[in-house]
Image (spheres, rainbow, N blue to C red):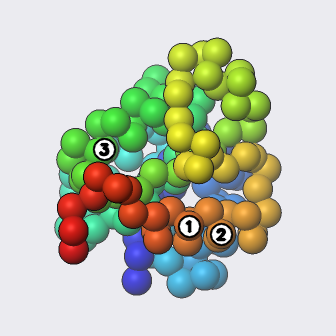
Amino acid sequence: METILVVDDEAQVRSLARDILLGAGYRVLEAEDGEHALRIAEEHPGAIHVLLTDIMMPGMNGKELADRLAVMRPDTKMIFMSGRAAEVISDAGVLIPVDAFLAKPFTVDRLLNKVRERLEYRSPFSRPR
């Protein structure tokens, strides 16, 4: 069973993502901000397969969180969510891979497809298994 860490400062978005992911058979960890997410990542004994994070959050943004989490857990795949257009996000100085972006609001199918896609993604720079 894969574990997904959901990070969003909006409780409604977190609970929607949690319910969808739990219904699909994933284990879900939740955090309301980047600092809490990093504490969870430090304390969680098992793997965290995917970080599903909002991009624009108070304090640490989603990209900063992903960069810090990647040092702790280099095998974790990243998905960045936002209700803002990609151009607005890049204008704010946050550059993310297009294939790791999920627009909010999302549908059940779009969320589950993006998670599956990221879980199956193998970077050309990945270590062989």
Mark 2 residue type: Asn
Q: CA distance from mark 3 to mark 2?
A: 23 Å
Dot 1 and dot 2 residues touching (CB under 8 Å): yes
Q: Position of residue 40 (x, y in %)?
A: 31, 53
Identify the residue position indicated by label 3 in the image.
Answer: 69
Residue 46 lies, in percent from the top left, at: 24, 70
Q: Residue flagged by tag 1: what amino acid is it?
A: Glu
Residue extending farthest to the front is 124
Q: Are marks 3 and 1 in contact (CB under 8 Å)?
A: no
Q: Earlier in the sequence, mark 3 or mark 1?
A: 3
Q: Is residue 34 left or right of residue 75?
A: right
Task: Quickly name the residue at label 2.
Answer: 113
Amino acid marked by disc 3 = Leu
**Marks 3, 2: nearer the viewer:** 2
Q: Please, is residue 18 above or below residue 79 in the view?
A: below
Q: Between 89 and 8, which is closer to the camera in this rendering? A: 89
Query: Is residue 102 depicted above or below 47 in this figure?
Result: above
Residue drawn at (53%, 28%) of the image: 95
Residue 86 is at least partly visible in this image: yes
Q: CA distance from mark 1 to mark 2?
A: 6 Å
Residue at 60% x, 81% y is 24
Tell me where residue 96 appears, x and y as whole percent.
53, 35
- Percent coordinates x, y for residue 121 in the rendering: 46, 64
